[in-house]
Image: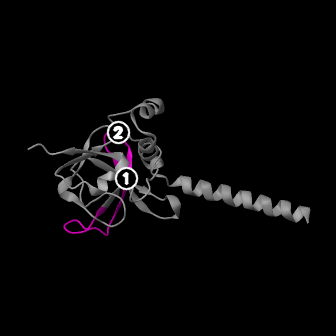
Amino acid sequence: MIRRDFLWSGAAVALLAGTAAALRMGRPQDAHATESFEVTKTEAEWRAILSDAAFNVLRKEGTEYPGTSPLLNEHRKGVFACAGCDLPLYSSETKFDSGTGWPSFWQEIPNAVGMTVDRSLGMTRTEVHCRRCGGHLGHVFDDGPPPTGLRHCINGVALTFKPATA
């Protein structure tokens, strides 16, 4: 009985290790790890300027809980910028209510974001990151409204909002 338990334990550890390795293999960070960005900082420097939540999303590719971003209810005219480097990313003109719980946009500002293939979590998605600092923003899907048919599903904590001036 003890030998069988030992063998099952070993098999379980091997399975978990293989699953973890498989999930890490396709991470977006691997895809753009060789990219160079205009804005670079050490982990300590990023931690000093970002909230814990923003650091988790922008630098560790985390995800905020749906429905928690105050930017969901931001309806003024203006620009949504990267919380890491302040690069303008999305115009309020392209924001829409996707019902997903995250700020959503049907188009980015030209030359604002980069995209990589994300094969984490056992699926293939398109990851969106700031082209200037490499900060993880969210993902883009093909179920958005016209004219692009895209839905940039973006973590609100990765953004700041700058209202338009009159």
- At x 90% / y 62%, what residue is drawn? 3
In the visual, does 19 lie left or right of 131?
right
Give how far across and how far down residue 72 sits, in percent: 30, 57
Instruction: Say above or below: 55 vs 22.
Output: above
Tag 1 residue: 155
| Residue 53: image location, x then y, percent | 44, 44
What amino acid type is highlighted by mark number 1? Asn
Rendering coords of residue 27 (x, y %): 49, 52
Going by the image, does 161 lie left or right of 129? Answer: left
Residue 144 on the magenta span: yes
Please tell me which residue lies in front, 166 or 60. Answer: 166
* Secondary structure found at label 2: loop
Which residue lies at the image location 32% right of the left edge and 52% below the top edge?
70
Residue 9: within the magenta? no
Percent coordinates x, y for residue 7 in the rendering: 83, 62
Q: Locate the C terminus by quadrant.
A: top left
**Vertical arrangement, residue 162 with respect to residue 21, above or below:** above
Q: Callout 1 environment at 10 Å: few (<14), some (14 to 19), or many (20+)?
A: many
Is there CB contact under 8 Å for labels 2 and 1? no
Q: Which residues are magenta?
A: 128-151
- Given the image, on which type of amino acid does mark 2 rest? Gly
The residues tagged by marks 2 and 1 sit, at their Cα atoms, a distance apart of 13 Å
Q: Count the marks.
A: 2
User: Can you tell which quarter of the image residue 103 is in?
Assistant: bottom left
Q: Which residue is mark 2?
A: 84
If the image is split into quadrants, where does the N terminus sit?
bottom right
Q: Residue 5, labelled with which disc?
A: none
